[in-house]
Image (cartoon, helix red, strand yellow):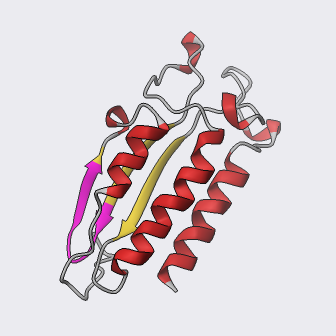
Amino acid sequence: MKFNLLFFTALFVVLNAAVIPSNKIPSSKPECSTNASTAYLDIILMIDTSANMGSINLRKISTTMSLIMPKFTIGNNWNISQGYRNTRISVVTYDTNAKIVANFTDINSIGDLSNILNTLTASNSQEANLLE
């Protein structure tokens, strides 16, 4: 159930993030492209690593993200006014506590993201703290 929620949330973000109505973007800033490969986004993957999630579902998340994220140009350049158009990704896990696994500067390619996601393991805690 949690995997489905995470999967559909990630899918919603990926499919809708690059489609921003032009009337919502200030005209003084460059528009985000509707082409995912030239979109500039900051994506934070929040992943439940409690025992309820299990290692099989963590592998499914890794596989799903490895299929979706190559559509984006992944990097950590942030200054769009200088012409940088890439997607920055960070990973946060949570069980009883939240933990930053990877900052935006740690992931520069789909390989980096895959390596980080493949190292995630389910904890022994049955709790998923959604308050922090």
Q: Against 5, is 113 above or below?
A: above
The span picked out in magenta is: 93-101
Left or right of residue 39, residue 84 in this image: left
Residues 79 and 124: in front is 124
| Residue 92 position in % (x across, y down) | 33, 57
- Asked where in the image residue 83 lies, by quadrant, the reply is top right
**In percent of the image, x 41 and y 76: which residue is there?**
56
| Magenta region, main secondary structure | strand
Identified at 43% across, 28% down, the residue is 76
Q: How many marks?
A: 0
The verdict on residue 97 being magenta is yes
- The quarter of the picture where residue 8 lies is bottom right
User: Measuring 33% from the left and 49% from the top, which residue is drawn there?
Assistant: 116
Query: Could you tell me which residue is drawn at 46 percent across and 33 percent down?
Result: 109
- The answer to whether residue 40 is magenta is no
Q: State whether residue 50 is above or below residue 63.
A: below
Q: Is residue 84 above or below residue 87?
A: above
Image coordinates of residue 47 in percent, x first then y, are: 39, 66
- In which quadrant of the rendered image does the C terminus lie? bottom left
